[in-house]
């Protein structure tokens, strides 16, 4: 078994064991435990549960259905009254494969190589391959065979870390203001004044970081909660945030920083080829 296969199996075993342990903890979770998790006074939580129609004392076990009932109560409590519901048409976000298809069809710089690179990553880490991605890769490979060469990698000067940082700060500020109710004109004018760039430049920066910030209000809210959580995570002596301590059961040291060489990836792919070959019949 290749080093990468062993690593993938070890991660799957660890996550399975961790999920089983979390399930056991959820089954034992009490109202007092839930209050600690929410960082909420126990009295406040008991009052909210009672208002939601759930009679509990702090030592009682709290189930997932109890939590969902509490969540619905709080959502209804804080939802502003609406005279008339507005119908909103939400377009589903494009999948990664659909974005790659569009970029390759437009012959964008390095798009075909990016599609192959993304495909290789999915294969190496044993991820399910979507049919539209497989069809795109089939076409790129067929074209490459006929031309006798692989697609070109993206050309051009790579972005500096400072440029990327400014882009993300601009995009984050733009959507923070827009989601808070500021108008487009007011938001762009304020950012333009801060970074001394015109409207077109500002919106190019915002567009370039749309995926990072979040393409929907729901996605941006999740990102804000994540960043808020990250700011609360204590910093260890080496200066690195203890993410695993806060978010997941701690991984064994050997799973935290896998060290793979180029040859390990080739060995892993060759193993997958051998594994997929049907045994010869006598």
Image (spheres, grey):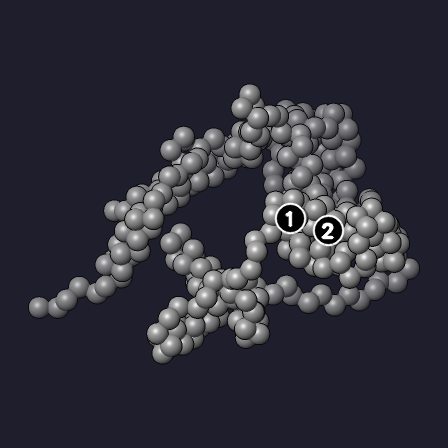
Mark 2 touches mark 1? (CB < 8 Å):
no
Which quadrant of the rendered structure holds the C terminus?
bottom left
**Residue 88 image position (x, y, % from top left):** 77, 65
The residue at the point 56 percent across, 23 percent down is 236
Q: Relative to the observer, which residue lies in front, 196 or 168?
A: 196
Q: Residue furthest bottom?
A: 146
Q: Residue furthest top?
A: 237
Residue 243 against residue 161 in the figure, above or below: above
Q: Relative to the observer, which residue lies in front, 196 or 268?
A: 196
One can see residue 130 in this view: no
**Would residue 107 appear left or right of 9 to someone viewing this image?**
right
**Would residue 270 appear left or right of 203 to someone viewing this image?**
left
Please give the residue where the numbered disc 2 appears in the rendered image: 171
**Residue 195 image position (x, y, % from top left):** 79, 48
Instruction: First in sequence, mark 2 or 1: give its number.
Output: 1
Please give the residue where the numbered disc 1 appears in the rendered image: 164
**Would residue 166 appear left or right of 268 to someone viewing this image?**
right
């Amino acid at each position: 078994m290749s080093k990468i296969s062993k690593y993938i199996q070890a991660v799957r075993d660890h996550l399975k064991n961790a999920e089983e342990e979390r399930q056991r903890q959820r089954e034992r979770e009490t109202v007092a435990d839930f209050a600690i998790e929410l960082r909420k006074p126990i009295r406040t939580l008991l009052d909210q549960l009672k208002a939601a129609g759930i009679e509990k004392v702090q030592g009682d076990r709290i189930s997932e259905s109890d939590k969902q009932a509490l969540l619905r109560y709080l959502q209804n409590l804080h939802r502003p009254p609406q005279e008339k519901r507005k119908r909103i048409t939400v377009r589903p976000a494009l999948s990664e494969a659909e974005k790659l298809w569009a970029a390759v069809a437009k012959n964008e710089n390095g798009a075909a190589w990016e599609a192959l690179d993304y495909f290789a990553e999915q294969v190496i880490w044993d991820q399910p391959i979507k049919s539209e991605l497989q069809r795109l890769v089939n076409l790129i490979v067929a074209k490459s065979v006929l031309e006798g060469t692989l697609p070109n990698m993206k050309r051009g000067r790579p972005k500096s870390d400072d440029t990327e940082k400014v882009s993300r700060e601009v995009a984050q500020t733009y959507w923070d203001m827009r989601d808070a109710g500021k108008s487009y004109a007011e938001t762009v004018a304020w950012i333009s004044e801060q970074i001394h760039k015109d409207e077109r430049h500002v919106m190019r920066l915002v567009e370039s970081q749309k995926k990072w910030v979040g393409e929907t209000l729901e996605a941006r809210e999740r990102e804000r909660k994540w960043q808020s959580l990250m700011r609360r995570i204590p910093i260890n002596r080496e200066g690195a945030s203890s993410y695993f301590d806060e978010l997941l059961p701690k991984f064994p040291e050997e799973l935290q920083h896998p060290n793979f060489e180029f040859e390990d990836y080739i060995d892993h792919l060759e193993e997958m080829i051998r594994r997929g070959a049907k045994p010869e019949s006598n």
